[in-house]
Image: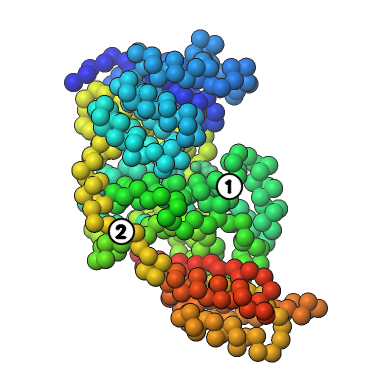
Amino acid sequence: MADKKSIRIGILGFGTVGQGVWKHLTQDKAALERRLGVKLVLARASVSDLKKKRAVKLPKSKLTADSFAIVDDPSIDIVCELIGGTTLARELTLRALANGKTVVTANKALLCEHGEELFEAARKEGVHYFFEASVAGGIPIIKTLREGLIANRFPLIYGILNGTTNYMLTRMEREGISYEDVLGEARRLGYVEADEALDLDGVDAAHKAVILAYLAHGKWVSLNDMFVEGIRKITAQDVEYARQLGYKIKLLAVIQRDFDKEALSVRLHPALIKKSELMAQVDMVFNGVSLTGDVVGTTLLVGRGAGQDATASAVISDIADAVYAIQGGPAPAISEEDAEVYDALGAGLRLAKPQDIASAYYLRLRVKDQKGVLAKVARVFADAGLSVATMIQHEDPGSNSAVLIFTTHLSNEAAAAKAVAKLENLDAVLETPFLLRIFNPPPM
Ligand code: HSE
């Protein structure tokens, strides 16, 4: 059991999050040291450009352009990987673990792509790899899932895991503004990732869903095996039609396990959700995660899913756990090196097939405004096995076309895909049909 008088921390990447961690560790150092019973030393931070101006100022001696100098420094105990990306970050993480350091990360893409390898490396070296900041920013979802709700199995976890798209959908809903206008606004505010596809195509939220699915079910799901759909095709009209039907549109991650069939579905797509649901009221840049456990029932966590301070809060929580672990204190109830726990959770589990994934649907269709068209559309629905719940026709004067908005009763992904493919081939259908899921969570 180590009993160090001080713990030295190195930070890889001194962008928004890195500076936030440094700022808060510096400001709140005395209180943290009292709680942890050890001195915390902010040893060094690495950057790609030493000359760049930064809001948080460091003595020159503490900044380096060589991240390897930090991971190879024998005096450093904890390495915070806040670089992002999956290439250099992977190399640095593996090297830090091999050097016996505890690593803390906010890097969801890295975990999603290489989690298995990184956990194995931590296991081999007898060190920890902590990642609270990787999912839902400041919401302590990893700790909640692994520790607070340890008594549970989870038939359903769902939520809003991307703040940028939630901000955009909220503004579209509240102000009726177009997707393009709200995207411009989100860019101006610096909310959109440099690689915009991460936010707009749902990739960032899908990475987070994969991590939660692993923690809850012991199975790494590839993005290629998931439905991953972003928000680019949603129009202000869809948001308004949804509102008229009593729904909001949210970009939802849904992780569902059928414990009888041992089938797991992990998906990420926009969905209509009843306005009265608490999740529908998680607006603007906030994230929300709903966990339904077989013992606890449903628990909903809401908070800031991104941003300097919220993410720094999660990283510092991991640094605290890292300090406890280094000092030989109580280990986390379940941690990444508990391979047996995760193997047992995922044993015999298969991915659900499209026909196993139940949902109701919203379908927007632009059609020729002619007699007989509705009958043809209805025939496609019937043949595919979809039952219509509501239909609204919006005339488009002067265009000889009309927009039809359908909602369906509960059906499944295979039937919905079949209907869309057939509708697309009808002469009377003028645009690619646009389908959204309707997500009805079970009562809390
Ligand atoms: N782009 C992400 C979001 C940042 O908007 O939630 C946090 O992962």
SS for dot 1:
helix
SS for dot 2:
strand
Residue 392 placement, left or right of 83: right
Position of 250 relative to 398 (above/below): above
Taking depth in this image into account, of 352 and 342 the one nearest to the observer is 352
Q: In this rendering, does residue 52 appear at all?
A: yes
Q: Quadrant of residue 241?
A: bottom right
Picture quarter with the C terminus: bottom left
Position of 149 relative to 318 (above/below): below
> Please, which residue is most extreme toward the left here?
1
Taking depth in this image into account, of 430 and 128 the one nearest to the observer is 430
Q: How is the image coloured?
A: rainbow
Name the residue at 53% across, 57% down: 229
Image x and y of residue 122, in percent: 29, 31
How packed is label 1: few (under 14 Cα within 10 Å), some, or many (20 or more)? some
**Residue of label 2:** 350
Look at label 2 and name its amino acid. Answer: Arg
Name the residue at 45% across, 30% down: 89
Image x and y of residue 105, in percent: 41, 33
Labels 2 and 1: the sequence-earlier one: 1
